[in-house]
């Protein structure tokens, strides 16, 4: 029988780290829920690594020391909820991808930073369903192979250029079929979708700056032409590049 009781919420924080930076977590006696707001990072547990990206949620057990290394040239940002609890379920790390949880974490952060005597009660209401959903899904943690991490670093550094799957498989050292399977296993998405998602996020930042035309943004983000860029952008965001700039 599964039992889960939150005793106390230690903190809810929002942090951001620049590219190529790192930080360590050690000697923590609390559980942690971490939501990745932006960027990608490698979580290093002793001799194992896993890669987390925007939309991922991590549930970490107490005393789970690790180092986090930011991957690529994007800032890495997250919201973390630390809490003590009784959980009748042994685990080390769980990982799930729930982009819809972003609003939940932002609300928890906003509520916990308010001077409100009921903030513990409010935030506990967010933690219960998140933890139960993650454990119920029972997604075993999949640690990253160094070869796949090397490919992701390459993609982040060369997204503005043409990138082929044959090129990526060669960098990984695996056959094309084996590489695509491993990449999907470790990132929960295909290489093409990963590249496209990264390029769209880069394009969003350039469009917000109002310093470039839509055609210039397309070229700077590695799209072959403005038509392909516009279709890909609208498919992912629901807006055309022009509509996004106006909004």
Image (tube, grey):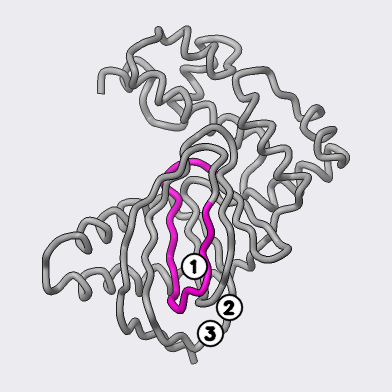
Q: Residues within 10 Å of mark 2 (few under 14, many from 20)?
A: some
Tell me the SS state at disc 2.
Answer: loop
Q: CA distance from mark 2 to mark 1?
A: 9 Å
Q: CA distance from mark 3 to mark 2?
A: 6 Å
- Highlighted magenta segment, given as a residue range: 23-40
- Residue 42 part of the magenta-drawn span: no
Which disc number belongs to residue 59? 1
Whether pointer 3 and pointer 2 mark residues with C-beta atoms closer than 8 Å, the reply is yes
Residue 150: quadrant of the picture: top right
Tell me the SS state at disc 1.
Answer: strand
Residue in view at x 70 percent, y 54 percent: 144
> From the image, which quarter does the C terminus lie in?
top left
Looking at the picture, how far across and down is residue 185, in whole percent?
70, 53
Whether pointer 2 and pointer 1 mark residues with C-beta atoms closer than 8 Å, the reply is yes
| Disc 3 target residue | 89
Which disc number belongs to residue 143? none
> Which callout, 2 or 1, points at the residue further toward the start of the chain?
1
């Amino acid at each position: 029988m599964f039992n889960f009781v939150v005793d106390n919420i230690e903190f809810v924080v929002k942090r951001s780290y620049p590219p190529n930076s790192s930080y360590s977590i050690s000697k923590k006696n609390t559980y942690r829920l971490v939501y990745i707001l932006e960027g990608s990072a490698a979580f290093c547990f002793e001799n194992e690594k896993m890669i987390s990206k925007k939309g991922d949620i991590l549930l970490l057990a107490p005393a789970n020391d690790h180092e986090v290394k930011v991957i690529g040239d994007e800032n890495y940002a997250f919201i973390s909820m630390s809490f003590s609890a009784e959980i009748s379920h042994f685990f080390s790390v769980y990982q799930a991808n729930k982009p819809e949880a972003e609003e939940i974490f932002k609300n928890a952060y906003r509520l916990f930073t308010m001077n409100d005597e009921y903030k513990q009660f409010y935030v506990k209401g967010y933690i219960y369903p998140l933890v139960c959903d993650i454990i119920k899904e029972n997604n075993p943690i999949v640690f990253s192979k160094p070869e796949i991490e090397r490919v992701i670093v390459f993609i982040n550094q060369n997204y503005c250029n043409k990138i082929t799957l044959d090129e990526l498989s060669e960098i990984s050292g695996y056959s094309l079929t084996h590489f695509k399977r491993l990449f999907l296993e470790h990132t929960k998405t295909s290489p093409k979708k990963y590249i496209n998602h990264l390029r769209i996020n880069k394009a969003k930042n350039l469009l917000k700056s109002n310093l470039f035309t839509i055609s210039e943004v397309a070229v700077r983000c590695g799209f072959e032409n403005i038509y392909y860029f516009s279709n890909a952008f609208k498919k992912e965001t629901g807006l055309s590049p022009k509509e996004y700039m106006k909004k």
